Amino acid sequence: MKTLIMKIYSLFFLFFTTFLIAQNKTDTLNLSEIPTQFTLSKKIHETSGVEFYNDFLYTLNDSGNQPEIYKLNSQNGEIIQTIKIKDATNVDWEEIARKGDTLFIGDFGNNLGNRKDLTIYSIIIPQGTLSKNIEINILHTYYFNFEDQINFNNKEYLVTNFDCEAFVYYDKKLHIFTKRWGDYQTTHYELNLNTTKKTLTAKKIETFNTECVITGADIYNKELYLIGYTKDGLAYTWKFINFSDGKFFNGEAQKTFIGLTPMISQTEGIAISKDKIYITGEEMNYSLFKVQPTLYIIDKNKL
């Protein structure tokens, strides 16, 4: 059965790739054919964000899981250390961003768009300990809302434009990218942390038609990367360069089709280093499609 499914997928991928090339709309890179890919531990089966620091990867699970960060070997994805965050709650952790040795944890997953407790934690990345299990304190807790959201009464699943799973730290601010189920776009908001306000306001900056919902982001050397997928399971990355004036979407944009989520997993995280791109996907277990949580490692010049 698995062989048949793979054959069907390969034929579909070939057809879809040919269509995209004919339309001249996007590049393609089939993650299922990437030689450097590793099945992740079941302990991180809902890996929902990833960050690279000092030759290690850091990831987390999303809603309902433990308030923990997992330090991974960046060569094979094996868990090296579990970092428990004291006094933190994992309502719906979806993303990690980094400023130096400070990690920001985005507890802002918002499938219904009705959360009024959107939260970002910050911690200092532990160094110099070989213990496999450690516990650390929160550095700061930030609460925020979106400046243009006035309605919190939605009860329908996967229609809101105020879901969120992606952010980066850049130019002394956090930059948040929404997961807009309503129109497959993303809105870029800025969050200024240098304030004494109890609840911060995410300032709306710009909107871009990503043609998919955005589930992860990272920035390296003035190159912004976003990752996401459609309800139909088409997975994509976006790369933005040559941007200016605090607006990422006024520069050049490159879209890449990276495969079907029923075959490559539900792509949730992306991290960038000097020469590598790391993509994590959470476990999928639907009917005929069963995909393990996976780490993909790609040479940067291929994406």
Image (cartoon, rainbow, N blue to C red):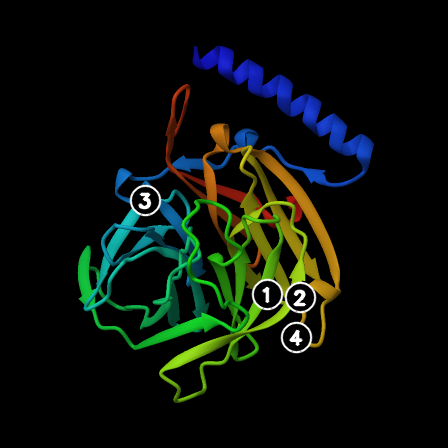
Q: Earlier in the sequence, mark 4 or mark 3?
A: 3
Q: Earlier in the sequence, mark 4 or mark 1?
A: 1
Left or right: 262 in relation to 284:
right
* SS assignment at label 4: loop
- The residue labelled by disc 3 is 78
Eye-nearest disc, 4 or 3: 4
Q: Give the amino acid type for the residue marked by disc 4 in the picture.
A: Gly
- What residue sits 43% from the left and 62% below the top? 152
Between the residue at mark 3 and the residue at mark 1, the CA separation in whole angstroms equals 33 Å
| Label number found at residue 248 | 2
Q: Earlier in the sequence, mark 3 or mark 2?
A: 3
Q: Pointer 1 and pointer 2: residues touching (CB < 8 Å)?
A: yes
Q: Is residue 39 above or below residue 139?
A: above
Q: Give the amino acid type for the residue marked by disc 3 in the picture.
A: Glu
Between the residue at mark 1 and the residue at mark 2, the CA separation in whole angstroms equals 8 Å
* SS assignment at label 3: loop
Horizontal and vertical percent for residue 284? 39, 32
- The residue labelled by disc 1 is 188
- The residue labelled by disc 4 is 246
Q: Residues within 10 Å of mark 3 (few under 14, many from 20)?
A: some
* SS assignment at label 1: strand
* SS assignment at label 2: helix
Left or right: 164 in relation to 31:
left
Horizontal and vertical percent for residue 70? 30, 54
Eye-nearest disc, 3 or 2: 2
